[in-house]
Amino acid sequence: MKSNARCSRQRLGGLVIVTSLLSACATVSSEPVVGVCPPVLEYGDVFQERAAEEVQALPKDTAIVEMLSDYAVMREQAWGCEDIQIQP
């Protein structure tokens, strides 16, 4: 009598792969997320003044100044996001 253990292992391996692929799909919603805005931290006046002084002390052509400019735009967009949330 021949052993069919090798065949069983192949089927089991295929089943494991298919199960993992299907379970990965089950954790993701196919519904679009509407009205989710990132939180925007509020900084106190003293902290903002200190940050402004530190930025002014940096050379104008530093990467940090450009990154902070981009960050300011993202903060403005996040603030605006809260105003235009669409209710499902």
Image (tube, rainbow, N blue to C red):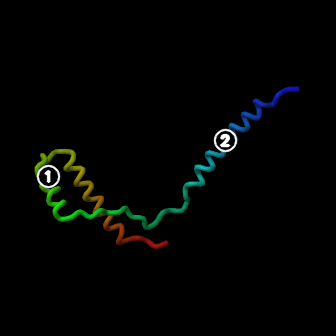
Instruction: Work out which quarter of the rendered image holds the N terminus and state it.
Output: top right
Q: What residue type is labelled 1?
A: Glu
Helix, strand or loop at mark 2? helix
Which residue is rendered at x = 60% and y = 54% of the image? Answer: 26
Total numbered circles: 2
Label 2: how many residues lie within 10 Å, few (<14), some (14-19) or many (20+)?
few
Which residue is rendered at x = 16% and y = 62% of the image? Answer: 46
Q: Please indicate whether residue 82 sits to the left or right of residue 54 in the image.
A: right
Residue in front for this viewpoint, 86 or 55: 55
Which residue is rendered at x = 35% and y = 63% of the image? Answer: 39
Q: Please indicate whether residue 43 sits to the left or right of residue 25 in the image.
A: left
Q: Position of residue 15 (x, y in %)?
A: 70, 42
Q: Residue furthest top?
A: 1
Is 85 rendered above or below residue 25? below
Where is mark 2, residue-wise? 16
Q: Which amino acid does label 2 sit on?
A: Val
The part of the image, by quadrant, that contains residue 45 is bottom left
The answer for how far apart the CA atoms under marks 1 and 2 are is: 56 Å
Residue in front for this viewpoint, 57 or 88: 57
Is 50 rendered above or below residue 21? below
Which residue is rendered at x = 11% and y = 49% of the image? Answer: 57
Label 1: how many residues lie within 10 Å, few (<14), some (14-19) or many (20+)?
few
Q: Where is residue 6 in the image (x, y as percent from the top left)?
A: 76, 30
Q: Please indicate whether residue 30 sits to the left or right of residue 63 in the image.
A: right
Q: Position of residue 77 (x, y in %)?
A: 31, 63
Where is mark 1, residue-wise? 54
The mark nearer the N terminus, 1 or 2, is 2
The part of the image, by quadrant, that contains residue 10 is top right
Pointers 1 and 2 in contact (C-beta within 8 Å): no
